[in-house]
Amino acid sequence: MAYSQGTRLPGESASKLGHLAVITSKWVKALVGEFEHASSATSDPAKTTWQSFDAVDVMPLRNVWAVDGSYVSIQSAQKPPKEVAFVKTALFTVDRARLDTIDKEHPHPLLLQDVLTSSAVFHATVFPLKNVRTSLGSNYDAVRHIVHDSMQIDENGAFYETLKWLAYRKWETTLHASSPAFECPHCHQKLETGLPYDADEGNCPNCNNLVFLSDMLGFHLDMDEDSAPDSVASAYMLIMEHLMLFTAIRLLWGHTDKSLVSETLFIKDGPLTLRSQYSKIVPNIRAFLQHAKGIGRPLHISGQEKSGAFFDHLASIARFPAPHARGEPMAYAVLSHDYVRREVYRSPDLSNPYGKRTNWGEKLYLKMDPNTYMVLNVPTGDYNEAGAFPTDNDLIGLSRILATLPSLVSHKFEGALFPIELANGIASMSSYPSAAILQRFVEDQAS
């Protein structure tokens, strides 16, 4: 590896001649020749199984909720720089009939204003990351208390109540479950039995220090005493996206009109997954979705991935399947675990079954017209680690989700969905408010 350029001296140029001897290998010669002269593929090398979808006899869903979030880290100009992270998430709802009146390519600002009026809720907070210490305690304690307080303050504690609803499985009215097990933020011993049913806080049985239900999520595992990485802000954004989405689900679940929750499409920007220590609530999410399916009140949820390995793989094969012209039926491909391992991750084996601990949705490719395709996630409820799982019959409400999406497509961006586009406009930290304004705010507060 070459030396990088510094402030006084130039960088080192990489050697252009040091590896020429390897070209004498016949295998390398063949590889170079194929790389330079290879003809483009005429069929899908992954042999993806696509199915045509006709929505003629399928009723689209009536209402739509979408959630999105963003975060930005800001450093002050002083030395050493103080660093904080602002996080913002937004929940947006719209009647699909009102959305149909808007031109998806050139939306009229007044019509957009009408749709957005009283249709969005947002949540925002700020975390200290580096060289910031309050009079109340260290960065470590500050982040823990900010997480705890921020969830409880907005919308009269509705998001925090959703955390309790998921942690204690409150949809099961006859079962008073304890929270998932988690590590104490003080002594780092595991609380095997979690917190008792409906508790906001408790004392660690090992060190007797106070722990919060929000500690169950595990933000403290990413921090040390005096600093926290950006991953704390990104993890909080992801957790809040989940809590906001499931707040809408929880409220509709308890509505007097029992059919309302099953007549709504819930869309999340990004995959339906929670990684690392934050995946502790994934089993409870799956259990709820399975419960809803089992009693005949299925939930229609979809996540959209706009980048990453799955999006790149779809972009490489999207030209092969129909539709090849506008007006043809759209097509979809449900990705089995074996397909994901073999074609997307290109791994001969995975140490753990794909998505077993982290995913509460399975992958789906969708092609609507020659130039509109997207990667979706749709839940199945219970997880099955079989390589052939899932099939289209395993994805909850797939037909109604596919019947609804065409009316939500925005032609302003590639493969965009209008509800996510609107939610992103509310949640984006790059424009509302701008990162420059936030930086000036931090510097003013630090002076």
Image (spheres, rainbow, N blue to C red):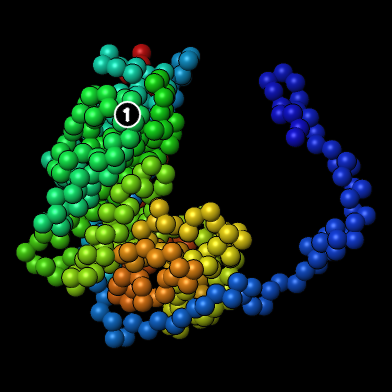
Q: Is residue 54 visible?
A: yes
In-front residue for pair 70/391: 391
Left or right: where 52 falls relative to 257: right
| Residue found at x 15% / y 44% | 197
Q: Nearer the viewer, residue 86 or 169?
A: 169
In the displayed structure, 110 sits above or below 38; it is above
Residue ID at (71%, 29%): 4
Residue furthest left as drawn: 256
Q: Quadrant of residue 3?
A: top right
Residue at x-position 9% and y-position 61%: 255
Q: Residue at x 49, y 68 (%)?
A: 387
From the top left corner, tell me how far across and down residue 220 is, in percent. 35, 31
Residue identifier under label 1 = 185
Residue 106 position, x and y percent, is 37, 63
Tell me if residue 122 can be seen.
no
The answer to whether 98 is drawn above or below residue 15 in the figure is below
Number of numbered callouts drawn: 1
- Image spot of residue 79 (x, y percent): 48, 14
Residue ranking furthest to the bottom:
57
Q: Which x, y percent locates residue 253?
A: 15, 61
Q: Quadrant of the N terminus?
A: top right
Identity, as a three-letter code, of the amino acid under mark 1: Pro
